[in-house]
Image: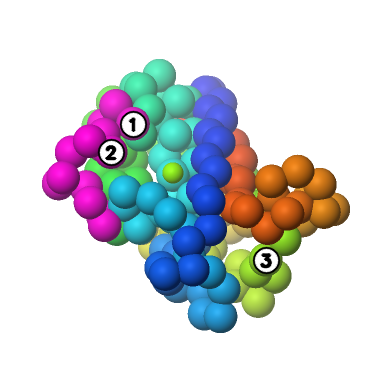
Amino acid sequence: MRVGIGYDSHRFDVGRPLVLGGVTIPDTPGLLGHSDADAVCHALTDAILGAAALGDIGRHFPDTDPAWAGADSVHLMRIAHDLVRRSGWTLNQADVTVIAEVPRLAPHVEAMRARLAEALEVGPGTISIKGKTNEGMGFIGRGEGIAVIAVVTLTVV
Ligand code: MG
């Protein structure tokens, strides 16, 4: 068995839609980024790649490459997951914590779990998503942006 960890953070950008875990969340500022800035997918992708020791999202999808401008991060995650699967690994479990003052995540968690499970071709029970605030502290507490931590386990097929 292998364990991978992923972390991502993005700054809020009121001019963009908020996409987290492949789900568009209304009435909240979006996130600044080269792709759609889906920090849940980015952290999860890094955890999946990390568990297989296959690099990171920046290596596979550099933000200097115009091909990934505005990219659907669910699509990038699927490409990375396919690479990991072709190396003989099966995704066992993913646990994701989103740290943000807004939005309130709970109403969106089930849609995100379903979307990610579908994209990764696993059962919805494989994907856990949890929301926390940062209790008003630091850049998250000031509402400047959000952060995401993901842990993944892989096993040999
Ligand atoms: Mg990112």
Q: Is residue 61 magenta?
A: yes
N-term-proximal mark, 3 vs 1:
1
| Residue wearing tag 1 | 58
Q: Secondary structure at mark 3?
A: loop
Q: In x, y percent, where is residue 74?
A: 35, 55
Q: For this view, does 70 lie left or right of residue 115?
A: left
Q: Tag 2: Cα neighbours inside 10 Å, few (<14), some, or many (≥20)?
A: some
Per the rendered image, the range of residues in magenta is: 58-71
Amino acid type shown at disc 3: Val
Front disc: 1 or 2:
2
In this rendered view, identify the residue nearer to me: 71 or 29: 29
Give me the C-alpha separation between circle 2 and circle 3: 26 Å
- Residue reaching furthest bottom? 27
Residue at 56% x, 30% y: name it.
Answer: 5
29 relative to 144, above or below? below
- Tag 3–tag 1 contact (CB < 8 Å): no
In this rendered view, identify the residue nearer to me: 87 or 56: 56
Q: Tag 3: Cα neighbours inside 10 Å, few (<14), some, or many (≥20)?
A: some
Q: Is residue 69 visible?
A: yes
Indicate the quadrant containing the C terminus: top left, top right, bottom left or bottom right.
top left
Give me the C-alpha separation between circle 3 and circle 1: 26 Å
| Residue wearing tag 2 | 63
Query: Mark on residue 102?
Result: 3
Amino acid type shown at disc 2: Asp
Q: Determine if the C-beta at disc 2 is less than 8 A from ligand 1.
A: no
User: Hey, which quadrant is residue 84 in on the image?
Assistant: top left
